[in-house]
Amino acid sequence: FNPKTQIGRIWAVSFRFDLCSRKEFYMITTKQRAYLRSIAAQLTPIMQVGKNGITDNLVKTLSDSLEAHEIIKLTVLEACPMTPREVSDALCVALSCEAVQTIGRKISLYRQASEKEKRKIVLPKEKKQV
């Protein structure tokens, strides 16, 4: 996020980039991230971040999509005032999700569904070290 841009200032005020303020803070392992990347490779982008950048409507829509699908892919357009990495970081904080990957202008995000009955993706477990 770039504090010199207008969208950066708006995000700095409305969302305090404090990882402790997340409701659920969890880190996925590299094996889990690789598994999620294999799933995300088959997806088509469902949303675009354009010249308005990240808006409240976008955050609400993405939150609903993450709740329904658990993993989503979106595209950052050239007209967006933020870089794809900045968009990914800002959305991860706003949505309490994990960034699976950012390649070019495509972003993949993952968040486990809040209800156990709605969970579709089962992540691989960590191996216990002996």
Image (spheres, grey):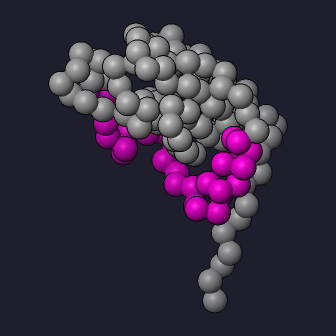
Percent position of residue 71, x then y: 67, 36
Q: In the current view of this chain or complex, which residue is farthest to the bottom?
A: 130
Residue 39 is one of the magenta-drawn residues: yes
In the image, taking residue 109 as reference, residue 17 lies left or right, namely: left
In the image, taking residue 104 as reference, residue 5 lies left or right, namely: left
Quadrant showing the C terminus: bottom right
To which quarter of the image does residue 4 belong? top left
Q: Is residue 30 visible?
A: yes
To which quarter of the image does residue 86 belong? top left
115 or 10, which is in the foreground?
Answer: 10
Residue 67 is one of the magenta-drawn residues: no
Percent position of residue 121, x then y: 77, 45
The boundaries of the magenta stretch are 12-41
In the image, taking residue 16 as reference, residue 50 lies left or right, namely: right
Residue at horizontal 43 percent and vertical 20 percent from the top: 78
Q: Is residue 116 visible?
A: no
Percent position of residue 103, x then y: 53, 41
Quadrant showing the N terminus: top left
85 or 122, which is in the foreground?
Answer: 85
